[in-house]
Amino acid sequence: MKFIGFTSAAVLCLSTLSIASPIASPESSDISSASRDSNGCREPIVRKEWRSLTKNEKKKYLAAVQCLAKKKSINAVPGADSIYDDFQGVHSSQTPNIHFVGHFLPWHRYFVSAYEKALREECGWTGGQPYWDWLIDSQSGINMTSWSIFDPKTGFGGNGPFVEIDESLNFLGIDGRTGGGCVQDGPFTFDKFKLSLGPSHDVNVSNPHCLTRDFAEPIALTNLVPEVIEEMMSKTTYGAFARRTEGEPSFDVKNVHGGGHFGVGGVLGAIGDAYNSPGDPLFYLHHANLDRIWWQWQQKDPKRRYKDVSGPIVPFDYTNLSGGNVTLDFTINLGKLGKSVPLSEVVNPESGTMCFKYDC
Ligand SMILES: [Cu+2]
């Protein structure tokens, strides 16, 4: 399957919708309008694919991210200098509890939504959080370094220069890494964008440094593939869907979550660090896309799937030997960045707490 040269938003959406079919039944609009009425979400923010933003919207979005990285921290963690760092710090400090668990997808949905809110309220962004439909790029036949998302003018800038590493640092056996140093072009070079947290996992220390990327094209091309999305979409329970989305912390089984993180982040790139991954602004577009795929899956049977959550509370405890399963009453939090909410408030993005939807 090749998706070359797509330019219009309408066509863009086909890349996953063709897989996600059957698309939203009439029921889905009943559900969303009902929840809008009862929860006060009348006009959900619409999230679009990066390519379908206008040139001017792209510019404004990138400027809003730079702005957030200059806004004084609310001290969500002691080492944060900016609000942008606050988000990274909250993710970092909760990393041991929010991955390979049932609430992985809801937690990240809530987290990205809070970030979207911060961009809008603190930095004048007026749109929805854009997503990056990497399938369009991975199936295009274009070299990764030339993918439009990495464009220095209309995108997020590209790779870092190659940095040699001791292979013992390459725990996951990442193939074909080509970078590792500071991003060299675009809106997130060190002179325009500083991170205070990382590469250590200590959120108490401020260590101003640059954003790094370490492209590993073979990882991106192998894992960001339609077959994996098809498998995910074929699952009939949330538990199975979510587990297939996260895969395993290895590449023995292809998975799109890791494909995005490690395809761009390799070994030394911020987005490839489980703790510090939100240090790369692309994190939010990658996770918005994962969230969109979950949403598309929910749309296939909204009545049931907006209520379906499961999966372990304790990481990797898929057989529930250490703890129970999450339920709709299970609460998640964003520390100082957002109140505690039960999963019941996060399963439907058109709920009062968040209030957004995807263009397709
Ligand atoms: Cu995460």
Image (cartoon, helix red, strand yellow):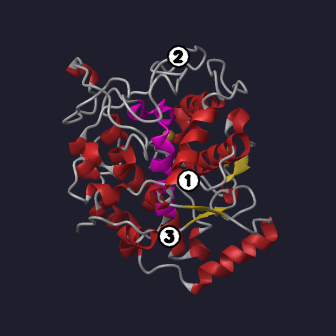
Residue 208: numbered disc: 2
Look at 63% across and 29% down and name the residue there: 86
Front position in the image: 340 or 79: 79
Amino acid at the residue labelled 3: Cys
Which of the two discs, 1 and 2, labels the residue nearer the N terminus?
1
Mark 3 — residue?
Answer: 360
Residue 46: image x %, image y %? 61, 63
Secondary structure category for the residue under label 1: helix
Whether residue 200 is visible here, answered yes or no, is: yes
Q: Is residue 203 left or right of residue 190?
A: right
Determine if the C-beta at disc 3 is less than 8 A from ligand 1. Answer: no
- The segment highlighted magenta reads 270-294
Q: Is residue 235 left or right of residue 314?
A: left
Residue 57: numbered disc: 1
Amino acid at the residue labelled 1: Glu
Is 271 covered by the magenta stretch? yes
Residue 106: image x %, image y %? 58, 52
Residue 123's quadrant in the figure? top right
Determine if the C-beta at disc 2 is less than 8 A from ligand 1. Answer: no
Q: Is residue 82 left or right of residue 283?
A: right
Residue 11's quadrant in the figure? bottom left
Which of the two discs, 1 and 3, labels the residue nearer the N terminus?
1
Secondary structure category for the residue under label 3: loop
